[in-house]
Image (cartoon, helix red, strand yellow):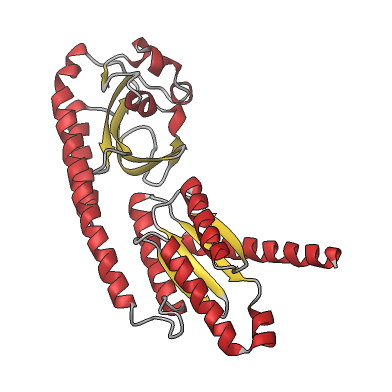
Amino acid sequence: MNNFESASIRALTFLRQKLGFQLCMVTRAEGNDWTVLHSDDKGYGVVPGDVFNWDDSFCCEMVKGLGPNIAADANQVPAYAAAEIGRKIPIGAYIGVPLRFADGRLFGTLCGIDPSVQPDDICEHQELIEVLGEMLSTILQMELRVDEEERRAERFQAQALTDALTGLYNRGGWEQLLAKEEARYQRYRQSSVVIVVDLDELKTVNDLQGHAAGDSLIKRAASALQAASRSEDVVARLGGDEFGIIGVGCDLAAGQVLCSRLEAALDAEGIKASYGLAVTTRTTRIAAALTIADNEMYEQKRQKKAADLLGA
């Protein structure tokens, strides 16, 4: 059990026993996914891994500053009374504080709900709840720093699994690091993107100019992709003229920016390529994202060939 997980479970047990709420949770908010990481539930049937709509939640209103951290009677708070989640499940009282990354970005929340309205003196516990939230945020931030060090160590160990021609990770290194990032997603529900790049003209270069020219093309492409990626990303040669990139911590929008940067880098080298991109989600594991990206790349390549035939 990692430190953030064990601290979350202990905090939830303490909080539920202290306040008597039927449900206390530690959650992850990413995009509109509001994922339960840990829960102490005695009535709502909520379990870790459940996903709700962030925009529907009281926590969303709290983070925006439209509702208080503690609402003894949630229906007396206009933002909470109007929230969609209150129409789906009975919520008489609410507590919630944000959990944040070191740079201030929102990670998720520590929160609790109960079907019954609570006495007004529950608000006396605000400082306690804030301290618990700050403690969990600090532990999370420390653990993520350790996690980053572990990632660097993993990359160092995987250096033995490199492609002789390009110096990038080879297929074995790629699969090893892919598995590591999947494990991180399961802990923190922080998405990554998988991008597949396939060079369009390697066969033509090999046929017309020889394999030395083809090898030079592959090496130039590898250098361009590496330079356009961030230090935390994984860039690998998957075989032949196919490359894979893991955009660590990227959502779809950030992944599209990264893919555009990769494309611009190859364009600047005069290298034509086809691209596929997919993002990890609660229903798309990283291996499945690779398959989706691969299929998207091949579809783009097929469309190019069809267009060339029509233009011939």
Left or right, residue 159 beside residue 294 = left
Left or right, residue 146 beside residue 157 = left
Residue 298 lies, in percent from the top left, at 66, 66
Along the line of sight, the residue nearer the viewer: 308 or 155: 308
In which image quadrant can residue 29 be found? top left
Answer yes or no: is residue 254 visible: yes
Residue placed at 63% from the left, 60% from the top? Answer: 296
Task: Give the tally of numbered discs.
Answer: 0
Residue placed at 38% from the left, 69% from the top? Answer: 177
Residue 150 lies, in percent from the top left, at 25, 65
Left or right, residue 309 beside residue 80 = right
Residue 35 lies, in percent from the top left, at 40, 42
Residue placed at 28% from the left, 19% from the top? Answer: 68
- Whether residue 279 is situated above or below residue 153 in the rendered picture: above
Left or right, residue 93 beside residue 206 = left
Quarter of the image for the C terminus: give it.
Answer: bottom right
- Whether residue 201 is situated above or below residue 74 in the rendered picture: below
